[in-house]
């Protein structure tokens, strides 16, 4: 789970199945599905166990590509690398430079995807 102070993230599922969690709401989309994850709200996505997924990600405003460049490394070959264990401490430190918060699993409210109180009230007002 993580939260952006600056960017909204938008995902269009090109292939596969992906579950998105944002502000305590969960939705699963297949090919053609679209998810908007607004700035300020804790969110995550998880690709289904049924197989890989391909998504188009749009992040607004621009700057997320700088974060990806800062935490990534060039691929040694034109193929996906083998999965590896991320350096969570390093990722968290670099994310803070880009006003992105990596939320620890011990924070129960945010782990469950709940919005902070001020955001939750705004969402509840929007539903009425």
Image: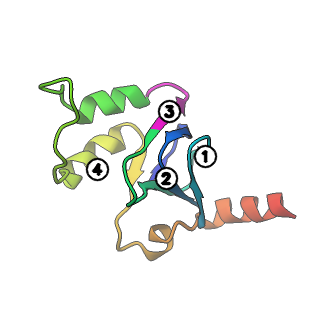
Q: Residues within 10 Å of mark 2 (few under 14, many from 20)?
A: many
Dominant secondary structure, magenta: strand
> How far is the residue under mark 3 from the one under mark 4?
24 Å
Residue at image position (28%, 27%) is 69
Q: Find disc 2 in the rendering and name its residue.
A: 18
The nearer-to-camera label among 1 and 4 is 1
Is disc 1 in contact with disc 2, using a CB cutoff of under 8 Å?
Answer: yes
Residue at image position (17%, 27%) is 75
Q: Find disc 1 in the rendering and name its residue.
A: 35
- For marks 1 and 2 on the same chain, the one whose residue lies earlier in the sequence: 2
- For marks 1 and 3 on the same chain, the one whose residue lies earlier in the sequence: 1
What secondary structure is found at the residue carrying circle 3? strand
Q: Find disc 3 in the rendering and name its residue.
A: 56
Q: Can you say whether 103 is above or below 58 in the image?
A: below
Position of residue 46 in the picture relative to residue 90 (left or right): right
Quadrant showing the N terminus: bottom left
What secondary structure is found at the residue carrying circle 2? strand
**What x and y, as percent, mark residue 34?**
62, 43
What secondary structure is found at the residue carrying circle 1? strand
Residue at image position (16%, 50%) is 84
- For marks 1 and 4 on the same chain, the one whose residue lies earlier in the sequence: 1
């Amino acid at each position: 789970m993580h939260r952006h102070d600056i960017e909204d993230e938008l995902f269009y599922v090109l292939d596969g199945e992906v579950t998105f969690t944002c502000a305590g709401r969960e939705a699963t989309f297949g090919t053609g599905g679209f998810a908007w994850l607004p700035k300020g709200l804790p969110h995550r996505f998880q690709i289904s166990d049924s197989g890989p997924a391909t998504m188009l990600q749009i992040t607004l405003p621009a700057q997320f590509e700088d974060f990806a460049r800062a935490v990534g490394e060039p691929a040694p070959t034109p193929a996906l690398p083998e999965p590896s264990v991320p350096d969570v401490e390093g990722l968290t430190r670099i994310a803070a430079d880009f006003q992105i918060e990596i939320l620890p699993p011990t924070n129960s409210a945010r782990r469950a995807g709940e919005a902070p109180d001020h955001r939750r009230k705004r969402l509840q007002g929007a539903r009425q």
